[in-house]
Image (cartoon, rainbow, N blue to C red):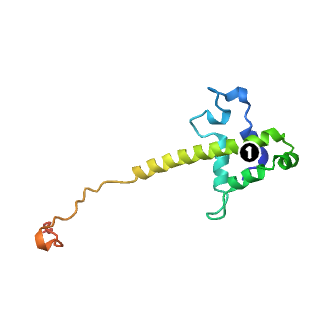
């Protein structure tokens, strides 16, 4: 379980430490960041068919004034969260999809088994020699 305070710390990385080529600090690394782990935690928080945690969170953040008062966070910061979360969701989905594709590929092993040879009107007859 991840606390809101921990999520806040992850999302609000100091811009001067990690900013590269004008990108936000959370989007600069090719490797999984702590923020991506936070996103994955939210994605897997609910059972399938129970809605999406991040969609609900973004909806709640739509009332930035109320969230600002509740969390004692400046309103301006809250208004930027939905964009950050959506970008990270896309990044996590893409990365996890690529890993799943590679994982599935590596499990397929060719057996060398060929379909049976068939001829003419007896097409359902297996023409391979029987073992002796």
Q: How many marks?
A: 1
Quarter of the figure with residue 111: bottom left
- Give above or below for 21 relative to 106: above
In the image, taking residue 31 as reference, residue 52 lies left or right, namely right
Foreground pick, 62 / 129: 62
Label 1 belongs to which residue?
7
Q: Does residue 77 lie above or below 59 as drawn? A: above
Instruction: Name the spot of residue 74 as percent of width and height, x first.
Output: 84, 39
Under tag 1, what secondary structure? helix
Give the residue at x 61% y 63%. Answer: 48
Quadrant of the image containing the C terminus: bottom left
Left or right, 126 with reference to 19: left
Picture coordinates of residue 69 (x, y %)?
88, 47
Q: Residue 63: x, y in percent?
A: 81, 50
Q: Residues within 10 Å of mark 1 (few under 14, many from 20)?
A: some
Q: Position of residue 36 (x, y in %)?
A: 63, 44
Residue 1 in the figure: left or right of residue 114: right
115 above or below 76?
below
Location of residue 121 (image quadrant): bottom left
- Residue occupying the point 65% across, 45% down: 86
**Left or right of 27, for residue 3:** right
Among the 4 quarters of the image, the one containing residue 13: top right
Tell me what residue is drawn at x 78 percent, y 43 percent: 78
């Amino acid at each position: 379980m991840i606390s809101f305070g921990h999520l806040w710390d992850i999302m609000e990385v100091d811009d001067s430490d990690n900013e590269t080529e004008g990108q936000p600090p959370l989007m600069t690394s090719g490797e999984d960041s702590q923020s991506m782990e936070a996103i994955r935690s939210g994605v897997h928080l609910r059972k399938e068919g129970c809605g999406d945690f991040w969609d609900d969170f973004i909806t709640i953040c739509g009332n930035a004034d109320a969230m600002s008062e509740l969390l004692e966070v400046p309103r301006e910061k809250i208004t930027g969260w939905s964009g950050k979360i959506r970008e990270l969701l896309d990044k996590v989905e893409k990365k996890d999809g690529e890993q799943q594709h590679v994982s599935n590929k590596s499990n397929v092993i060719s057996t060398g088994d060929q379909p049976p040879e068939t001829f003419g009107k007896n097409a359902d007859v297996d023409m391979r020699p029987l073992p002796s």
